[in-house]
Image (cartoon, rainbow, N blue to C red):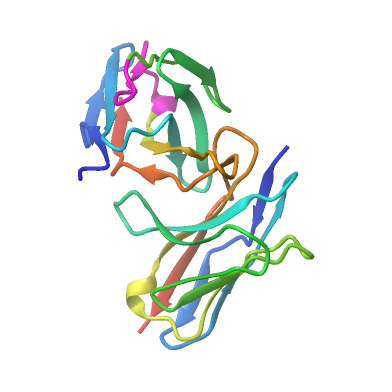
């Protein structure tokens, strides 16, 4: 079945550092891929998505590219801010009736 | 556009009590689901529905019931609350794009923080 493997945290960075959170997936066919963000005390919000191979999703300075050859969708940001501190979830929308989520990565950015 | 609305936001129950967590969406989405989120455990699927009158079990269904009488509403019932059900509960809705046959993005409610004492 579908599965998502996500880089385990927690991740702690200094402000303006480069961020990468790894995400790989297993799925049949051509799934859609998502990154969600959860700020403290809130629900999950869609951060970005990509629906086909080589698509790049981007939002708020974050980017992720759908790499079918490596079955990956790594999240990157060139310069993180304190306000980016949150939990990040990679997710897959495939043939299953529900989205499949990774386990989440806690990011803390220090000033 | 309200999206997905969950009530209540906070609840404290005594062991053995029952209650219903409410979830409503106004986007006419076919799919709705309930997750629980525990520290270090990510999201775990409790129950889901692919349309009115159709529900199915997820990863952790024991102790919970659901029904889907309308497209808009998908309540989650705790039959006899236990301390192990202390968690944050999220409701989500989504749909399958007809042209793609794949599940689209999910929209989440703000969550219900439940404590069972």
Q: Is residue A74 depicted above or below B94 in this figure?
A: below
Q: Is residue A103 left or right of residue A108?
A: right
Residue B61 in the image: state x and y as whole percent. Answer: 52, 20
Residue sitting farthest toward the right: A69
Q: Is residue A103 magenta?
A: no
Residue found 52% across the figure and 74% down from its top:
A63
Please name the residue shown 51% across and 32% down the image.
Answer: B45
Residue B83 horizontal/vertical position (percent):
39, 25
Residue ranking furthest to the front: B99
- Percent position of residue A60, x then y: 38, 75
Question: Where, quadrant-wise, is the C terminus of chain A in this rendering?
Answer: bottom left
Is the N terminus of chain A in the top left, top right, bottom left or bottom right quadrant? top right
In the picture shown, does residue A107 fall above or below A104?
below
**As rendered, which of A38 and B2 lies closer to the eye?**
B2
Where are the magenta residues, as a range?
A: B70-85
* B74 inside magenta stretch: yes
């Amino acid at each position: 079945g579908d599965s998502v493997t996500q880089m385990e945290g927690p991740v702690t960075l200094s402000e303006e550092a480069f961020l990468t959170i790894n995400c790989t997936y297993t799925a049949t066919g051509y799934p859609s891929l998502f990154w969600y963000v959860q700020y403290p005390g809130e629900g999950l919000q869609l951060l970005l998505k990509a629906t086909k191979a080589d698509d790049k999703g981007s939002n708020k300075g974050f980017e992720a590219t759908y790499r079918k050859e490596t079955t990956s969708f790594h999240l990157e940001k060139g310069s993180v801010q304190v306000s980016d501190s949150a939990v990040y979830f990679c997710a897959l929308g495939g043939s299953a009736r529900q989205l499949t989520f990774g386990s989440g990565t806690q990011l803390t950015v220090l000033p | 556009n309200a999206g997905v609305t969950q009530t209540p936001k906070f609840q404290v129950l005594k062991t053995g009590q029952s209650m219903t967590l409410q979830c409503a969406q106004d986007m006419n989405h076919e799919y709705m689901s309930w997750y629980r989120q525990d520290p270090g455990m990510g999201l775990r699927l409790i129950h889901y529905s692919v349309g009115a009158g159709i529900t199915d079990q997820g990863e952790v269904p024991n102790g919970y019931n659901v029904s889907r009488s309308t497209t808009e509403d998908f309540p989650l019932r705790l039959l006899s609350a236990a301390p192990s059900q202390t968690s944050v509960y999220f409701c989500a809705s989504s749909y399958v794009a007809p042209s793609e046959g794949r599940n689209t993005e999910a929209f989440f409610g703000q969550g219900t923080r439940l404590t069972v004492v």
